[in-house]
Amino acid sequence: MLDTGYTETAYGGGVTVLAGAERGAYPFAHSVLVRGTAETLVIDPSLSLVGAAPLADVVLVSHAHEDHIAALADYEASVPVHVHGADLAAVRSRAVMVEGFGLPPDAAEDTDLMLRDRFHVQGRPGATGFEDGTVFDLGGRTVTVVHLPGHTAGHCGFLIEPDGFLFVADIDLTSFGPHYGDVGSSLTDFEASLRRCREIEARWYGTAHQKGVIEGTAEFSARLAAFAGVMANRDANLLSFLAEPRTIEEIAARRLVYRAHVEGPHVLPVERRTAVQHVTRLTGAGRVTEVEPGRFRTV
């Protein structure tokens, strides 16, 4: 049985990170509790909060993935739930969320059951959308939406002031690197979001998974550069592989994202979408050419 406990660590005067089990590694994640003088807010009620979610007046969701909303059902329908408009439909409907993974039909059915049974995802029809720059005033403390698309179209971070805490969600700084393999994901948007993160000065930077909280702009920038470097490594590996003409299917089978031992119905769809995005970008930059329909080679 999964351990769904969490540990609390305070940052500043009103920010508490609710660290998930197993250092927040998937299927767990880190959540954030923000207290103002008027209201209390929770960001990303994760699997570790199921059955033990703290009281809150408002819930914010960084993006529509199951590991970030597993404890959403712990909050009554009267508690407002907000997510970026681009991810709103997927938070309102589990079926829409599954559709966004772009899986084969049989795998989509299994995934729907997994989201229901393992992550308690029910859909939140009453959820409402926010946009970049929306401010939630909790009384003496504000939470400002920072749209950071790429991982999903609506993926967002949240800047909490006056504490100087920036929650960057699944810009998680792990060695796995950026993930942009869903139907609505974007390599180009992810790169732009990384650039935006570099421009935001904060005292603490909170991630949703293993790395937890990073203190200081210099340390965060260094780790962000290493995280972005995974994208550059994927480019380099692809350019080397395309020394001879290859198809997208051949690139997907070779793998840019997952190691060879990783299995599952999600692997090839993610690899295909990732390959297409890298090939498209490198072709636009003049570094790859389509030598015949559907076959690409390094210039």
Image (cartoon, rainbow, N blue to C red):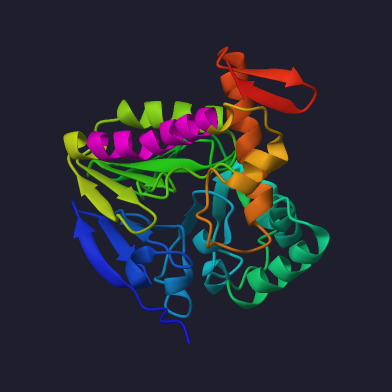
- The spot of residue 273 in percent (x, y) is 66, 40
Q: How many labels were placed on the picture?
A: 0
Q: From the image, which quarter does the C terminus lie in?
A: top right
- The spot of residue 137 in percent (x, y) is 38, 44
Snapshot quadrant of residue 250: top right
Snapshot quadrant of residue 295: top right
- The spot of residue 128 in percent (x, y) is 62, 48
Residue at point 24%, 31% (across, down): 201
Residue 51, placed above or below residue 275: below
The answer to whether residue 230 is magenta is yes
Most extreme residue toward the front, as rendered? 244
Q: Nearer the viewer, residue 212 or 141?
A: 212
Q: Main secondary structure of the magenta part?
A: helix
The answer to whether residue 142 is magenta is no
Is residue 133 at least partly visible in the picture? no
Q: Nearer the viewer, residue 163 or 111?
A: 111
- The spot of residue 141 in percent (x, y) is 30, 45
Residue 143, placed above or below residue 296: below
Would residue 198 be found to the left or right of residue 89 on screen? left
Snapshot quadrant of residue 93: bottom right
Most extreme residue toward the top, as rendered? 286
Q: Nearer the viewer, residue 283 or 159?
A: 283
Is residue 114 at least partly visible in the picture? yes
Q: Magenta residues?
A: 221-240
Residue 173, placed above or below residue 72: above
Residue at point 61%, 15% (across, down): 284
